Image: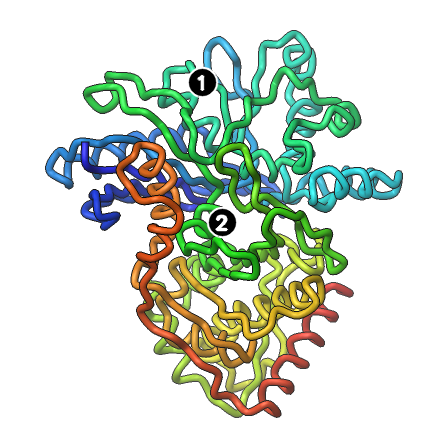
Amino acid sequence: MTHILAIDQGTTSTRAIVFDGAMKAVASAQEEFPQHFPDSGWVEHDPADLWATTAATCRAAIEKSGGAEIAAIGITNQRETTLVWDRKTGKPIHNAIVWQDRRTSAMCQTLKADGFEEVVTDRTGLLLDPYFSGTKLAWILDNVDGARARAEAGELVFGTVDTWLVWNLTGSAAHVTDATNAARTMLYDIRKGRWSQTICDRLNIPMSMLPEVRDCAADFGETRADLFGRPIPILGIAGDQQAATVGQACFEPGMLKSTYGTGCFALINTGDTPVRSQNRLLTTIAYQLDGKPTYALEGSIFIAGAVVQWLRDGVKIIRDAKETQPLAEAADPAQNVVLVPAFTGLGAPYWNADCRGAVFGLTRSSGPEELARAALESVGYQTRDLLAAMQADMGGTGDAVLRVDGGMSASDYTMQFLSDIIDARVDRPKVLETTALGAAWLAGSRAGLYPDMDGFAATWALERSFKPSMADEDRNRKYAAWQRAVTATMSF
């Protein structure tokens, strides 16, 4: 048993990666699945797609590896996405409501007006926002016929995507989650390490629906024997951004990473102490091992890589994401087109659920090149927003180095602009699949196959370092234009 299977269930696709005993990826498989947009600002997934693509990619990856003997499975997943299903049949009662979904904006506003946000922030470290699972779950119970009565009768269960996958992998034997996913539901007290009765009561959520919370490296059950030929233990789970934090070996307080996938998420390790943000960042659990949580401050951007998908599928100026960088490099330097990608509202530090995307600075000669450049630059601007908030909360981060990963981090153009606009060094590791690697290490360390935390941190290797080269005048001018654009977008 010399290999680990990592499941990386994301917002637009599911991947499975087989890692060998040296933590090297030796085989992988990936499948995209449909996105559903039933109304403005609403985003859903078919739960069957999440499970079917997981099972298929796992089998394909194992087959591509030559039938590697899998010692354990680690899971990482899109966070906050909310599912409710029948405890006996396993049949979902509604589509999964995706983390990007904004349908509970009015509910959140009502709760804020009642002064409930302080209770939420004190217990969960989060803000009252449609992003999180709690109000999504309440919406399902309120809007699906008979759901609330069935929930109160103990017939329904709730889970984030990790819980849904484990339920199916184990043949309904395990209804569990880990501390990092629980911390994103808006229902979990991150200081006391338990579900909050106060919040559940206010949202009218029966606590019998909630899964058991375990460490990130723990026994989550075994797969059904018929899935992969024999039962395989599931020994690691972490939400995608926390798994990336682990994969980047950000184990010391002050270490900072940013992941560029569908969205962008920056986390800074704050150690044993949860830091209460004064700048509308989130206090969350970075990882929990041996019953001990390590905390982080997090800034969440809803649209990063998804802006490139918009260029491809929305305005149709590219056919492949790889075309974006050459277009951006060919853009007219005299033009200053700014794109605010608030397609599903703005995340940290603005938390405006109702504003929508906008483009500023267009001229008659603006074209695909300028739009492509504005799309890539929007990721750098949003990251600077987050880092400025983190520096304010932490009293400065010194000469912090930003470790990056995720699909967009492969773009040299985007990473150089990121370094320029934040005026800091950006380090890209040799292994960009840090999210899957983090999940694999959690499972592999639990299985005794991989080294301990210090040994794992020693394996982190740099591929390229980006250093700022932009003049201060240009940096300040461009960022000021971004700030004006955001202000205008939120006031529209």
Q: Amino acid at mark 2?
A: Gln
Residue 14: x and y, percent?
A: 36, 41
Q: Residue at x 41, y 70 (%)?
A: 427
User: In the rendered view, would you say 252 is above or below 472?
Assistant: above
Q: Secondary structure at mark 1?
A: loop
Query: In the rendered image, which quarter is residue 138 located in?
Result: top right
Residue 415 visible in rendering = yes
Residue 95: x and y, percent?
A: 52, 30
**Left of 442 or right of it: where is 61?**
left
Q: Quadrant of the C terminus?
A: bottom right
Q: Residue at x 69, y 18 (%)?
A: 206
Front-most of residues 440 and 265: 440
**Pointer 1 residue:** 174
**Left of 192 or right of it: where is 445?**
left
Residue at the right extreme, as displayed? 114
Front-most of residues 48 and 163: 163
Q: Secondary structure at mark 2?
A: helix
Residue 442: x and y, percent?
A: 38, 39
**Pointer 2 residue:** 241
Q: Amino acid at mark 1?
A: Ala
Residue 323: x and y, percent?
A: 34, 70
Q: Residue at x 51, y 43 (%)?
A: 287
Query: In the rendered image, which quarter is residue 156 located in?
Result: top right
